[in-house]
Image (cartoon, helix red, strand yellow):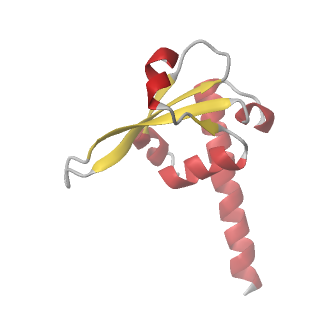
Amino acid sequence: MPFFSNSSTRIESLIKETIRSYLKSVLGISGNVQIKRIEFFPIYGLCEFTEEKIITKLCVRVKNRTSYILVDVRNIEASGIKLVEFIDYLFDFGAKQIEKPANLLELI
């Protein structure tokens, strides 16, 4: 069993490093401290196969920077990361999801 638990830890570490690298390339952040300053909100669309409502994009920015960056979920998943892992990582390091829809248009 130790082999599998160690393997699991290595996979989790690899996932976190991939997300950190992705955020660094998209937002130009340098470390975990800046992840706390990330604000994001999801954009929903319809799945082309099932026509169910799904998250298709995330709008992300570092707080106090002027503009949001639109990130396509397909680009996140193309890097080998599941969307839920990506969002969990953001929450784990203190990023904030903007939840008041009335204020979203003002922020963009």
Give how far across and how far down residue 3 sits, in percent: 73, 81
| Residue 67: x %, y % from top left | 55, 15
* Residue, far bottom: 1
Residue 80 seen in render: no
Seen at 72% across and 42% down, the residue is 94
6 w.r.t. 79: above or below = below
Name the spot of residue 74 as percent of width and height, x first.
40, 42
Asked whether residue 78 appears in the rendered view, the answer is yes
107 to the left or right of 64: left
Q: Quadrant of residue 45?
A: top left
Does residue 105 appear left or right of residue 9 in this picture?
left
**Which quadrant is home to the N terminus?**
bottom right
Q: Relative to residue 27, is residue 29 drawn left or right?
A: right
At x 71%, y 64%, the residue is 10
Front residue of 8 and 33: 33
Q: Is residue 84 above or below residue 45?
A: below
Of residues 63 and 15, which is closer to you in this image?
A: 63
Residue found at x 78% / y 34%: 31
Q: How many marks?
A: 0
Give the residue at x 77% y 38%: 32
Please determine whether, in this image, residue 4 is positioned above or below residue 30. Answer: below
